[in-house]
Image (tube, grey):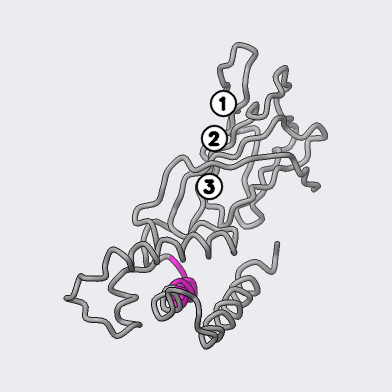
Amino acid sequence: MSTTILNWSLEVTQYPVPWTPETVDGVKRRLNLSLTDTTHDVSLSEEIRAATLQLENDLNQSFITTGWRYTTSRFPSDGSSIRIPKRPLQSVTSISYQETDGSYTVVDPSVYSVDTGRREIYLNYGQSWPGQTVTTQQAVQIDFNAGYGDELTDVPQLIKQCIALQVCKWWRDPAMEDNDTSRFDAAYERIVAKLFDQFYAGG
C-alpha cells in the first residue's frame, strides 16, 4: 500500500483541557518551592506552557487530546493512502471536500479505514476517493484528534519529566547566561532522543 505526500496545512480546531500534562505544583516539587506560596505561579505556568509547546514541536505531537484540521488541495489521484502528520493519532472524525458552490460534502466513512498506529487513511476494497472539480488550497479537509488521552495520567511520565527539566533550566538561569545549564540541554536532548526511539521507531 503506497502513501501519497500532499501539500498540506494544519490548524487546531479544539484546544486541549488541561492544556499541558505538567502542573505548577509538579514543577514546584522539582524546584523545592513551597506549594502554598503562589508568588511565582503565573510565571511558572507561562514557562510550563512554553516548554510544552517546544516539546510538542520537537516531537511533532499533541500530548493532551487536541482537535486538528488537515487541509490539502486534492485527494491522491492514484488511490493511495493519506498520512496524517501529527502524532499520536487517536481518530479521524470526518473527511470532506469542497463543491463548486463553496459548500463541503462529507465522505461516507464506509469508503475508508484508519490505521491510527501508522497514521494512515486508506481506501476500503472497491472504493475510490471522490472526484473533484475544485482544487483550492482547502478543497479537502480532514478533521482528526491527536494526543495520548484526555487526562494528565494518559501522558507518558518521560514527557512530563522533559517539560519539567526545561522549566527548571529557565527558572535557574532566566537570562540564559550560565554555561552550567548546558547539562540541562544535554539531558533534554537525551530524553527527546529516547522518546523518538521508544514511540516512533515504526515511522
Q: Is residue 176 toward the left or the right of residue 109 in the image?
A: left
Report the amino acid beneath label 2.
Ser
201 w.r.t. 105: above or below:
below
Is residue 130 inside the magenta stretch? no
Q: Nearer the viewer, residue 151 or 63?
A: 63
Look at 64% across and 52% down and name the residue there. Answer: 119
Q: Amino acid at mark 1?
A: Val
Residue labelled with disc 3: 91
* Residue at (45, 71) in percent of width and height: 163
Q: Residue at x 78, y 35 (%)?
A: 79
The residue pinned by badge 1 equals 106
Question: How many C-alpha atoms fall within 10 Å of the one at disc 2: few (<14), some, or many (≥20)?
Answer: some
Badge 3 marks a residue whose secondary structure is strand
The part of the image, by quadrant, that contains residue 69 is: top right
Residue 184, position in %: x, y?
A: 52, 82
Q: Which residues are magenta?
A: 155-166
Q: Which of the pair 147/124 is nearer the observer?
A: 147
Q: Residue at x 73, y 37 (%)?
A: 125
Q: Given contact means CB atoms under 8 Å apart, are the residues at marks 1 and 3 in contact?
A: no
